[in-house]
Amino acid sequence: MMKNPFINLGVIALTIFTTHSSILQAAQKDTTFVATQNPVVSYKYLGDPAALVHDGTVYIYAGHDECPAPQQYYLMNEWCIFSTKDMKTFTEHAYTLKATDFKWAKGEAWASQVIEHNGKFYWYVTVEHATIPGKSIGVAVSDSPIGPFKDARGSALITNDMTTQYTSIAWDDIDPTVFIDDDGQAYLFWGNTQCYYAKLKDNMTELDGPIHPINLPRYTEAPWVHKHGDWYYLSFASEFPEKICYAMSKNINGPWIYKGILNEIAGNSNTNHQAIIDFKGKSYFIYHNGSINTDGCGFRRSICIDPLFYQKNGSIKRIQMTTEGIFK
């Protein structure tokens, strides 16, 4: 049935103005909302989502895209936190971690991830180092998944000069992801154009051994490591514009078997960044695209969630990006 064709343009203009004004604002208090479709968060631009399942709750950590329309560049100063107990009702938490909370950094809140270990929560982040040229990885710690977090080291965990034997670019040390294996050993994976990994000490703030390169076909950035059944999975952003591809292994140290494309190019976004989780018997693929109407783009991204399915041989069915998402 056709809806009323008479439209109040003043109301629409006010709505657009209000949306665009609030879309750059940090949360002033915890705010709860019900998601009905993708993007999950429609009132704020968010990219590079990472997810943590803890104590019956999913926590999503994402960078806040603040680039004002119609400009086209990355502007990210902080990370935001969302939580849900049912994948329908979400809460944005007022606390934000800022790149400048790391005193040795000069800004740029790029991709990050939070993981729990021994009752504490460790937030691994990408920032621009203030004195060592290039991107670097820091780690903050908290007693709660929603903060407050504080710099756990007072210095960077990874700096650009630690990986120059593999590539000379200044932005290869980005996109940290941490995985804790069944034996309790933690591993840090990261990298742009070259994927790296290293063991972490039990304190989660120091490397425990050398940095190793991982050679993956078509690798660009955004590694994510998870385990399902007997298989380890290493998914990553591939080429540019970015798709998500993945590899599988029976051992966290490899060898990794390349399995191909998992998720096609994200709509209206050159980048693609994923988190894969199991929660209450279902599997989820959490990613970003540029679908917020009207100024969403690769520099003003939005979080989406679609279901993920494994096949009998352990491989993953290709993700179908939908507007309905997990809410249909």
Image (cartoon, helix red, strand yellow):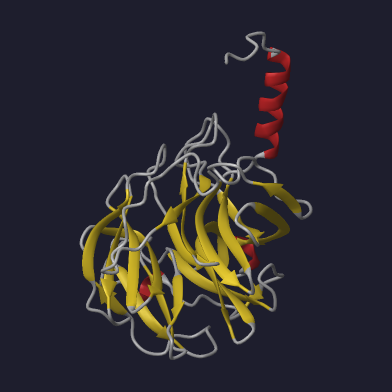
Viewer-proximal residue among 249 and 238: 249
The residue sitting at 67% across, 33% down in the picture is 19
Percent across and percent down for residue 75 are: 54, 47
Judge whether 10 appears above or below 265 on screen.
Answer: above
Relative to 11, 42 lies left or right: left
x then y, percent, for residue 268? 41, 37
- Please indicate, yes or no, whether residue 74 appears anywhere in the rendered image: yes
Residue 148 or residue 67, whichever sits in front: 148
Q: Residue at x 31, y 56 (%)?
A: 317
Q: Quadrant of the N terminus?
A: top right
Residues 307 and 261: in front is 307
Q: Residue furthest top?
A: 6
| Residue 254 drawn at (x, y percent) | 26, 79
Q: Quadrant of residue 244?
A: bottom left
Q: Which residue is located at x 63 percent, y 81 percent? A: 120
Residue 206 on image: x %, y %: 49, 85
Q: Is residue 242 above or below residue 223?
A: above
Q: Quadrant of residue 61?
A: bottom right
Please tell me which residue is depicted at 29% across the width and 47% down the height of the picture.
240
- Number of labelled discs? 0
Is residue 125 visible in the rendered image? The answer is no
